[in-house]
Structures are given as C-alpha cells and as structure tokens.
Amino acid sequence: MQIPVVIQAGGRGIRMESLTEVLPKPLVPINDKTMVELVLEQFDGNIYMIINYMADLIEAYLKNKNITFIKEKKYRGTAGALKLLDIEGDFLLSNCDILVDADYDKIIDSHRKNRADMTIVATRNKYNLPYGIFDYTKDNRVSMILEKPEYTHVINTGFYIINSNMVSLIDTDYMDMNDLIQKGLNANRRIFLYHIENDKYTDMGTLDSYKKFIKGLE
C-alpha cells in the first residue's frame, strides 16, 4: 500500500439500529471478529480512523492496533471530518462497513495515471422491479407494457482515492460525500470512476446485508 488509509467509522449506524443501540457499527460481531477488523485486514501501513459515536469504546477495543484515531467533537457527515486530517497528497478512504476485493495498487495507479483529484470505486448493481410498467400517451392511452424490467445502475461503493486538494473544498463543518463530489465537479476537479465486478464488493452496512453476509459465512 503506497498511501495512507482512512477508515470512516464515526456514524451512528442508523441502518443497523437494533444492533447499534448497544454497540457502534465498527464493533458489530462477525463470527470471532468485528466488522471493522475485517475491513482493517485489507490494509497495511499508515491507518487513520475517524470516530465519534461510542468513540471511547472503539478506541479501547482497537488500542493495540497501529491506528491514529481522529475524534469528531460533533458529527461532520461522511466528508466533513476529512478536514481534521493532517495528510498531504493522496489517501485511500473506506467506509467501515464495506469490503472491496480488488488490487488496491492498481486502483492507485489508475488514479495517478488519470491525474485524478478523486477516484471513486464503483460497481454495477442490478435491480428487478417486481411490477409491470407502462408507457402511455398524453391522453393516457397505453402504448406498451414491460413486465418486471431489470435496471442496471453504477453505484458508489464507499471506497475512494482522494487527493488532499479535494479536502480544501470542504468549507462547512458538516458535509456529506455526495456534496463534496458535486463541489469537485463544479470546481472542474478531475473525478474518475474505477469499476469493479459486483461480486468483489460486499456491503455489510444494513441489517439485511449484514444478515446475508453472516449467512454466507456459515
């Protein structure tokens, strides 16, 4: 790994609320490990972790790991806390509830070859609409019916290579990543996608996806 790694682990884990009322999302158990330990196993080198909700518990649990903890005094959104980092140049940012099975050096090389300010790791997600849909005219005459269509979307995995010049665009205490991306586009920053196959991406961040992941390990 050629660059620092930042793990975003400060959120309240609302999408897993029945579990995260007791534990912060990073410490939700997966067999004999925690969620964030599975994420950390992907990386080496300089690791920073942004924490807020139950921050003391996270820090105590991971105290023997080689991690620099960045504590938010208030929740800053999925991008706002990047202002607290003291990193120059490129760094890797990952959510604490995802796994990306990819060659990270290739992602970094792609980022640098593109002279990118941000590279967003993306994958294709297929969604089957369980209904028939209609095309119709202005006077409501049906012209076509399509039964249970399948749509494919390119989605954000929550895994990025970011140059510190993007952080300079964060001009408020609170900012979500989508807002930072839009500010970068408005400022003509070089933002690229790096595509991975869907089976190389695991989302553990909702109760349903967490249960599905656990079941797949059985």
Image: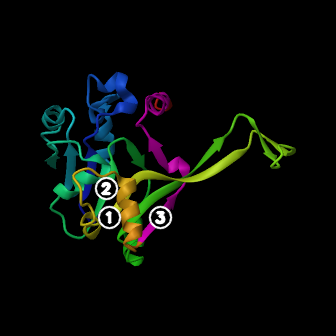
The residue sitting at 82% across, 43% down in the picture is: 140
In the depicted structure, whether residue 124 falls above or below residue 181: above
Quadrant in which the N terminus is drawn: bottom left
The residue sitting at 17% across, 33% down in the picture is: 61
Q: Name the residue under label 2.
A: 93
The residue sitting at 46% across, 31% down in the picture is: 217
User: Is 145 part of what is drawn in magenta?
Assistant: no
| Magenta-drawn segment | 191-215
**Does label 3 or label 1 sit earlier along the sequence?**
1
Question: Of helix, strand and loop, which one carries label 1?
Answer: strand
The image quadrant of residue 190 is: bottom left
Q: How crowded is mark 3: few (under 14 residues within 10 Å), some or many (20 or more)?
A: some
Q: Do the residues labelled 3 and 1 touch (CB within 8 Å)?
A: no
The image quadrant of residue 88 is: bottom left
Question: Of helix, strand and loop, which one carries label 3?
Answer: strand
Q: Name the residue under label 1.
A: 162
Q: Name the residue under label 3.
A: 193
Whether residue 179 is visible: yes
Whether residue 44 is visible: no
